[in-house]
Image: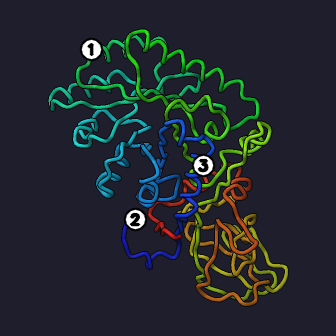
Amino acid sequence: MSTTDKSLYPVWVEISRSALKNNINELKKNINIFNRNIKFCGVIKSNAYGHGLIETAQIIENDIDFFGVNALWEAIEIVNKLKTTKPIIVLGYTPLNALNNIVNYPNVRIIVYNIETLEKLNQLAEKNKIELNVHIKVETGTGRQGITEEQLPNFILFFKNSKYIKLEGISTHFANIEDTTNHVYYKYQLNKFKEFVELFKQKGIDIPIKHTACTAACILFSDTYFNMIRPGIGLYGLWPSKETYLSCLIEGREMLNLQPVLTFKTKIAQIKQLPVNSYIGYGCTYKTTTPTKIAILPVGYYDGYDRKLSNQGFVIIRNRRAPIIGRICMNITMVNITHIEDAQLEDEVILLGSSADETISAENIAAICGTINYEIVTRINQVLPRIIVD
């Protein structure tokens, strides 16, 4: 945030502490984590999927074993602001010229898939006479980051010879576990992962932590757990996809009681009456057919409120839906409140969330915008205040 004075912002996000705690407990119960000595890595990358990096980290710190972030700067911010000693895994890419920061943060470890990264880390570790823990990512069929089988001998040789770089973990990521009810491909990837682990073992390297399970895997397949899981979207009370939900039913699994954590809000900035045949918004895409009362909302696509909702989406005011009319602007949205007679200036407006019997979910918005729930919450502007509520 650019300022700590939250009253300056007419748009904000509320984060439910109780919902977040509930979701962690639901995931733990589902995998029987208590009796299986499985570690829990809470993935809070990309501003905690839009929920607020530090706010989320504060809430879950005592309920997890590892934090998972995307970038080194996120890890450093968590350490500096929370003073946490919990281990943090940087899941994304760490540039070579940033690796010197690692020596100052012993609880931070990075995911490695380039030999150049290991060589640079080794130089830094030798110079500072400190051991550094790393995790590697192996390519099992997703075609993103990861060490291929052909590259593996160089990595094995490195770890056999390195005095200071310790291989703490090995991971991979599934390509098609969320988007289908046919889970043949995940089995293929899982077997490839096991082959990598075995190749290390044959060379005398037993890797302490093995992790592959995203939220969908956590919910559906116990053979993906190994000794650490790393759920992301499920922490925030969102299902990875409708296919995951259906697969859960098909597999006869107990349904998780996931509770959405985030509510996206603004307030009414102006109310006015417009006559019949009035155009509203850029491009004159909406024209009133009757006398119409509208509310002007100080929120737009700058804030992460998608322009595709223009003339299609809804908001909730005084427990009633109000349709968006005209195009969503950079900082302004217009809604029809003719049917909400008691609406007043600065009434609270729910853009995403629930009020009484009305709900606008991330899935509802994603369906209109032609995307996924992940994108809807993650794209909410990072500068907006995240306010923790019970």
Residue designated by label 3: 234
- Please identify the quarter of the rendering in which residue 335 is found: bottom right
- The structure residue drawn at horizontal position 35% and vertical position 30%, both measured from the top left corner, is 134
Residue 12 drawn at (x, y percent):
52, 70
Q: Is residue 9 above or below residue 63?
A: below
Badge 2 density bin: few <14, some 14–19, many ≥20, Cα 10 Å: few
**Disc 2 vs disc 1: which is toward the camera?**
1
User: Which residue is more in the foreground, 302 or 320?
Assistant: 320
Q: Type of residue at label 3? A: Gly
Q: In the figure, is residue 317 to the left or right of 210?
A: right
Residue 360 drawn at (x, y percent):
70, 65
* Residue lying at the far right of the rendered structure: 289
**Disc 3 vs disc 2: which is toward the camera?**
3
Q: Are marks 3 and 2 in contact (CB under 8 Å)?
A: no
Residue 24 drawn at (x, y percent):
55, 51
Q: Type of residue at label 2? A: Met
Residue 283 drawn at (x, y percent):
69, 67
